Image (cartoon, rainbow, N blue to C red):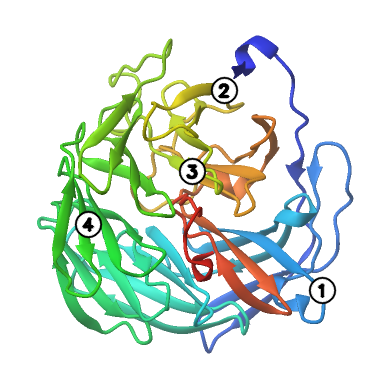
Amino acid sequence: MNDTRETGKPRSWRRLALASVTVLVLATVGVTWLAVAAPAPRGRGRVAASGIAPSATRGTPGTHHYLYVFPDQAMWVYDIDHSHALVQHRAFPGVRGVRGVAFAPATRTLYVSFGNDRDGPGSLMAYDPVTDQAKWTRTYDFGIDSMAVSPDGRRIYMPTGELASGGTWHILDAGNGDVLGSIEGGNGPHNTIASPDGSRVYLGGRNLDYLDVASAHSGQVIERIGPLKAGVRPFTINGRQTLAFTTATGFLGFQVSSIATGKVLFTRTFKGFGYNPDTFPATAPSHGISLAPNEREVWVIDGPNSYVHVFSISRLPKRPPRLVANIRLPDRFSGEEASCLYDCQRDGWLLHSRDGRYVYVGDSGDVLDAVRHRPVLELPALRNSRTFLEIDWSNGSPVATTTRSGLGYVGAPSSSS
């Protein structure tokens, strides 16, 4: 087991150096463009700004990988293939209270939910990253939260908010934002996953100790997984939709359940690590979970102790997850995100890059080496956001995404990648 408390190896920080910027206000779409005008010097302790936007890759061979980070009123884009250099910064005036982000490769449309996570109003913006234009913005009389988009890019499953009074997920037309129907799931609609094959929607109700599974065709809940430790918080599934990995309110650890039977298989805590709710105010101490794309490991946040714990899951479902590393983060999960409208406590979030090389830690800003199990970079925008995903480009167009839910990809349809 690799534990950074024992090795004591220092990490080499590369902090972000911002280049001079040119500001162009696109009044017709309400978007401010901050384009990196010149490279910053590269060197020890820095991340350089390359100035090559994703849309400029037309004619460049190969696939290019970018991390998109969404603090309130902004979008920061980092080039994963080139030391996470900053390549774009978009200001989104008025897009405050960001709760979710999803990308549909089929329609090359990026969606950002923002506003109120109670009973409304909530808003949804559709944005074309190729043309740098907002397609539309809709405001609803219900709340919003962390939504999911169907693999074909036609439907959005929008939870009405973790603090909403009911358990409704609205089904939206991804083309124009119209409400097409609804799904009634667990109380406190919060996190959402659309299955890679498009057949199911996984509904994380904050106030229900079951993970609901709905049919994408009928809009009806067809299964409940649990009972779990408490209300469902960040969760993920594997590519074949046989296993669910969930975290819970007030619980330091995670659970593994069978999607086929709906039963909990294993409950894991972090041996030697404690949790005192009086000293760690966030309600979910393990607010972040991500599967390695090859599904050999699961990574889980330990907010109270500012660690990320790594478990081998190669022998599931017959044998329980096995601890392989405890990674200490340089900065604690403390204080609040800067320029944040509400729900600003640094809880954390986790996501693997699509190729499995890196793990991104929201609210700490850290980029972790997924092979060596150690921090390697800090991205300032990531310090102030739990909302981010990867979008991959080829020949000047976006072609793939990770979602923000840390999914596994073994056995999943290739179009979902």
Q: Earlier in the sequence, mark 4 or mark 3?
A: 4
Q: Earlier in the sequence, mark 2 or mark 1?
A: 1
Q: Return the x and y of residue 262 as percentages of the image width and height.
A: 20, 44
Alpha carbons under labels 2 and 4: distance apart: 32 Å
Residue under circle 4? 213
Label 3 – label 2 distance at C-alpha: 15 Å
Return the residue at label 2. 325
Please give left or right for residue 106 compared with residue 232 in the image: right
Residue 184, image x, y percentages: 12, 63
In terms of sequence position, does the residue under pointer 1 or pointer 4 come before the other? 1
Q: Left or right: where does residue 339 sit relative to residue 219? A: right
Let me know if residue 334 appears in the view.
Answer: no
Q: Label 4 is placed on what type of residue?
A: Val
Closer to the N terminus: mark 3 or mark 2?
A: 3
Residue 228 x, y percent position in the rendering: 20, 35
Within 10 angstroms of label 3, few (less than 14), some, or many (20 or more) residues?
many
Above/below status of 295 relative to 95: above
Q: Amino acid at mark 2?
A: Ala
Asked if residue 266 lies left or right of residue 120, the reply is right
Closer to the chain start, of discs 2 and 4, is: 4
Q: Position of residue 349 (x, y in %)?
A: 46, 43
Which disc is residue 61 wearing? 1
Q: Residue at x 53, y 58 (%)?
A: 389
Residue named by callout 3: 291
State how far apart marks 4 and 3 are (Cα). Answer: 19 Å
CB within 8 Å, label 3 to label 2: no
Is residue 303 visible in the rendered structure shown here?
A: yes
